[in-house]
Amino acid sequence: MLLMSGGVVASFLLSSCTRATGRSIFSPLTRFLHGNSTSLPSVSTFSTEKEYEMIQITKQPNQGREHPPPTVLLFGWVGSKMKHLEKYRKAYHDRGCNTVVTILPTNYVFFDFAGNTKDFSEFLVSTVVQNNLHKGGILIHSLSNGGAFIFQQFPELCKQTPGLKPFFDSMEGIVFDSAPCHMSFTASRSVSSIMLNLKPDGWPSFFVGSFFTLMSVVVNCLGDHSPWKFWGDMKSWSFGPKMKEIYFYSDNDKVLDMKKLEDLVAFRKENAQANNTDPNPSMYFFKGMAHVTLIRNEELFNEGVSELLNYHTKFHQQYQ
């Protein structure tokens, strides 16, 4: 455990690759969290790979609190590092929230052979419940599709895993930051260019983008990461009438299709109005900002974060 100003950070190491057998790498660690093991297994007991991801938990002190603070789940974008997410974590921690920061392993995004994204998401939710971090309410800040892929698993987990129902009952709101991105060849080229530091209009970007697009479609054509399945899930998800949703987007985002996103939000807004549910989705437009850089417009970013946290306060006053 690492000590940090204002709270305690617990770091859980996760592998970013599966075993050769295809068995979920999370099962030993999940068993530990469910109380079936007396000690945390070493890394080598559930993976022999070199790369690891981390779940970083920062808890607010409990002294003098009448009610537990909300917990914000922060989902990083594909290829991000914990250091890239620190400013996001701090934005919520400084406002009195617990934070849980995680990054979906990159190979799960492109080649989800054995449902590893679902296993990863279930492990994440189990971690939150086992640490009683859901009791003050759950808020989510999801960056790009790397974050949206995690959230995509939640409706199915809610149906299939009764033991995690306290988590889903505690969800109050989500910010989609530079997300969700409608998947296309153009978007794939942009992602490849960003990850590999290539010129967006160069031949290397074209060939790399073509390769990843072809391979990911072939591998995931029947899975959750297929473009049609993902976009359908982003349009249709529901956790009841009390779930607030906020979208951060820009006109200079080379990965996100602004028109597709606006159409998606309009669809969800019409659906909310037709079903007489509250609240309706909110949108924050960041003019001229690139993909996952919207936090640089601190004033507008903080305005959106404040709406989410103010909704949390209103939620507990009205429903608790």
Image: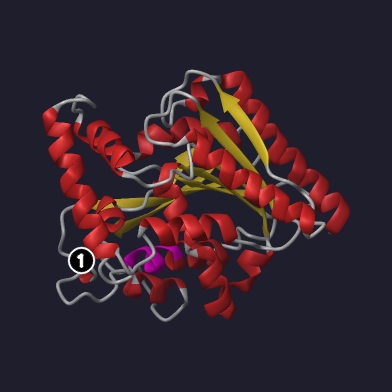
Percent of width and height locating residue 140: 57, 48
Residue 278 is situated, as x and y percent measured from the top left of the image, at 79, 52
Residue 136, x across and y down, in percent: 70, 55
Q: Is residue 1 visible?
A: no
Q: Is residue 147 magenta?
A: no
In the rendered structure, which segment of residues is drawn in magenta? 116-121
Position of 154 with respect to 291 (left or right) is right
- Residue in the foreground of this view, choosing between 220 and 314: 220
The residue at the point 65 percent across, 51 percent down is 268
* Closest to the observer, 205 or 74: 205
Query: What residue is drawn where x is 53% and y is 32%?
Result: 249
Indicate the colouring scheme: secondary structure
Q: Is residue 16 above or below residue 222?
A: above
Left or right? Give the position of 220 relative to 84.
Answer: left
* Label 1 crowd (10 A; few <14 / some 14-19 / many >=20): many
Q: Name the image quarter holding residue 224.
A: bottom left
Q: Which residue is pictured at 24% across the width and 70% down the height?
A: 46
Horizontal side, residue 215 vs residue 245: left or right: left
| Residue 5, position as x, y percentages in the image | 53, 34
Residue 140 appears anywhere in the view = yes
Amino acid bearing label 1: Ser
Of 208 and 165, which appears nearest the observer?
Answer: 208
Residue topped by disc 1? 47
Q: Is most of the magenta stretch helix, strand or loop?
A: helix
Where is the C terminus found, in terms of image quarters? bottom right
Residue 109 to residue 144: above or below: below
- Residue at the farthest right position: 318
Q: Is residue 117 magenta?
A: yes
